[in-house]
Amino acid sequence: MTAEREVGTVSVETLDRNAPILECRKLRMEFSGVRALRGVDLAVHPGEIVALVGPNGSGKSTLINVLSGMFKPTAGRIVFRGEDITGRAPHAISRLGIGRTYQIPRPFSTMTVLENVAFAAMFRHDGLSRTDAETAAWEYLDFTRLTPVAHKLPPAINLQQRKFLELARALAAQPSVLMLDEVLTGLNPAEIAESVDMVKRIHQSKVTIVIVEHLMRVVTELATRMVVLAQGEMLADGLPSEVMRRPDVITAYLGRQHA
Ligand code: ADP
Ligand code: MG
């Protein structure tokens, strides 16, 4: 049921300001004995940029994988725009408007950069024709500055370009929530600055963002909220400036990084 139907004449605009767009409740994920998520509650509201941080192995990628339907949670619920979507397939979740990038880029390596992006546009909720998908793909390539490598195969482009290709593919599916898993990792300072600017522009186009990021200066610059995971549990959730000062957060994560 959509928000509009639930509230009748109340405008979605009014509702959206308070209601989460994406939410998980008591989410658990176990992999043959490994408890990667141990009951995570998270509510993401429209317009937020939520930074998801935590030490390696704390469950950040798993959370994104479960929210995007890659893994069915062991327990718990996932709610998108008020609708329970727990257990739905990745393509169904993508079509609802939840997009993601992968920590390790995974384009189709036998398709060109352009074809990869056009493919994503063909399979989105409004399923563009091949020609329209290609036209749209050029726009996403322009946005991500990949036009010069449009006809190359992904193995022939550099890391930053592969990361941007992940972004272009995710954007081509027209997400309303976009989850970015370490898109800046491995990039040099100039590339990071360029990517941060790109994330800001995506956010300005009314996309709600969840970003897994280790660099605290990037979190400070981008995030409206900071969520810290430690050993599959949520340790903190609040304003970045406040969360970064918390002694338990510093011990669990920040201290280690800045030691
Ligand atoms: P992070 O992204 O925070 O570094 P992950 O979510 O990748 O952490 O991993 C959390 C825990 O879950 C780790 O112990 C990891 O080994 C385990 N894990 C993640 N994905 C799988 C999987 N597909 N199969 C088995 N264990 C996994
Ligand atoms: Mg990860």
Image (cartoon, rainbow, N blue to C red):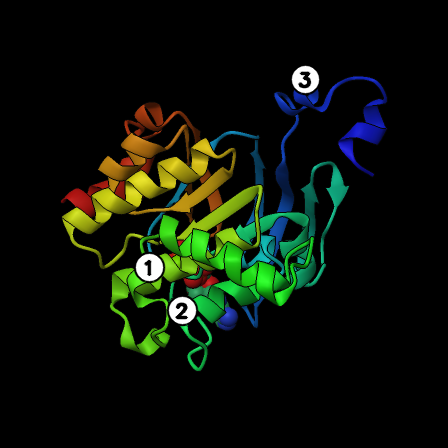
The residues bearing labels 1 and 3 have C-alpha atoms spaced at a distance of 38 Å
Establish if 126 lies above or below 17.
Answer: below
Residue type for callout 3 = Thr
Would you say residue 36 is visible in this rendering?
no
Amino acid found under the numbered disc labelled 2: Val
Residue at point 70%, 47% (across, down): 77
Identify the residue under disc 3: 14
Which residue appears at 26% of the width and 60% of the height? 160
Instruction: Give the quarter of the image for residue 236.
Output: top left
Q: Secondary structure at mark 3?
A: helix
> For mark 1, what is the residue?
146
**Where is residue 212 shown, x and y percent of the image?**
39, 48
Tags 2 and 1 touching, CB below 8 Å: yes
Give the amino acid type for the residue marked by disc 1 in the picture: Leu
Q: Give the residue number, with chain letter if any, for mark 2.
A: 113
Q: Is residue 186 above or below residue 235?
A: below
User: How many labels, in total?
Assistant: 3
Kindly report the distance in space between the C-alpha atoms of the residues bearing marks 2 and 1. 8 Å
